[in-house]
């Protein structure tokens, strides 16, 4: 998912901001950087990247906003303007949730240091990302903004990854409803043959007991094996 995210910097005037933004990206696992008509990419860019020189070196440099996002199916533009964007405004956490749920390529666009994105550029974005900073002092430099958004993206990615791993673990280690149903039928059949179960109340209580225990597949296999052993003993005894 992180490989589908492109950080786009529009007409960056301070070359050091490119390096600092690259560093912010790399610490959170983002690698795709696109620069739209930067004033320059120079030694300062590499110096401030502090180990993220590869992201600066591999950055795609284009001439226009349109070229930067041409293959993206979700474009999110950052903006400090609130009045005319109310219906499309999202905060960093919601932005990350939308990105995680999206399957195509995504561009998150940061505007010019002084004036941000133009109205024309904002109209080309599906959503507008606003960082709810302290209204009395809302000054965030470019790299800080990139770091904050990148952090939320990584947290959303890790949460999704944890959820997928948890579901995979359940699938690998825990029995399906069908397997449990077979076990309960097996249990009822054996216990009835032993004369232990006289009514459905007992099997209902046993089901509740086993559900609470959250049996794993290997544990269920052991119990089925025990039931099968009892069945063999019953057959031998009858013979």
Image (cartoon, grey):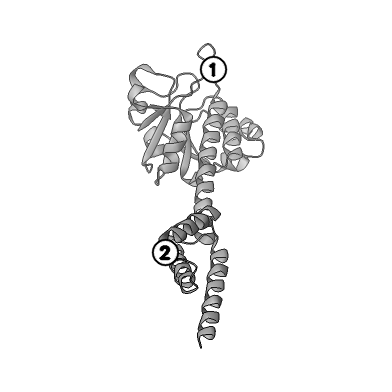
Residue that protrudes farthest toward the top in the picture: 136
Q: Is mark 1 on a helix, strand or loop?
A: loop
Residue labelled with disc 2: 178
Q: Is mark 2 on a helix, strand or loop?
A: helix
What residue lies at 54% left-to-right and 47% top-to-bottom? 162
x and y percentages locating residue 82 in the rendered image: 39, 18
The answer to whether residue 203 of the structure is visible from this angle is yes
Compared across the picture, whether 173 is left or right of 184 comes to right
Quadrant assignment, res 123: top left
Compared across the picture, whether 120 is left or right of 162 comes to left
- Of the numbered discs 1 and 2, the one sitting upstream in the chain is 1
The numbered dot on residue 157 is none
Q: Nearer the viewer, residue 199 or 23?
A: 199
Q: Nearer the viewer, residue 52 or 40?
A: 52
Nearest to the eye among marks 1 and 2: give it. 2
What residue lies at 45% left-to-right and 70% top-to-bottom? 192
The numbered dot on residue 139 is 1
Q: Nearer the viewer, residue 198 or 26?
A: 198
């Amino acid at each position: 998912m992180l490989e589908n995210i492109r950080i786009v910097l529009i007409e960056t005037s301070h070359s050091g901001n490119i390096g600092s933004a690259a560093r912010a990206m790399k610490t959170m696992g983002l690698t795709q950087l696109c620069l739209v008509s930067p004033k320059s990419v120079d030694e300062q860019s590499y110096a401030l990247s502090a180990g993220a020189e590869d992201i600066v070196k591999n950055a795609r440099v284009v001439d226009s906003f349109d070229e930067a996002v041409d293959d993206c199916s979700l474009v999110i533009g950052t903006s400090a303007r609130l009045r005319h964007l109310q219906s499309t405004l999202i905060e960093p956490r919601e932005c990350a949730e939308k990105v995680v749920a999206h399957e195509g390529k995504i561009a998150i666009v940061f505007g010019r240091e002084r004036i941000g994105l133009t109205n024309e550029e904002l109209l080309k974005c599906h959503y507008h990302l606003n960082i709810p900073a302290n209204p009395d002092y809302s000054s965030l430099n470019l790299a800080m903004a990139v770091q904050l958004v990148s952090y939320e993206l990584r947290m959303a990615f890790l949460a999704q990854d944890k959820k997928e791993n948890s579901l995979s673990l359940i699938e690998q280690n825990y029995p399906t409803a069908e397997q449990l149903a077979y076990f309960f039928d097996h249990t009822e059949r054996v216990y009835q043959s032993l004369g232990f179960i006289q009514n459905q109340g007992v099997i209902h209580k046993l089901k509740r007991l086993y559900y609470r225990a959250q049996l794993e597949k290997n544990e269920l296999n052991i119990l089925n094996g025990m039931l099968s052993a009892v069945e063999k003993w019953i057959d031998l005894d009858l013979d």
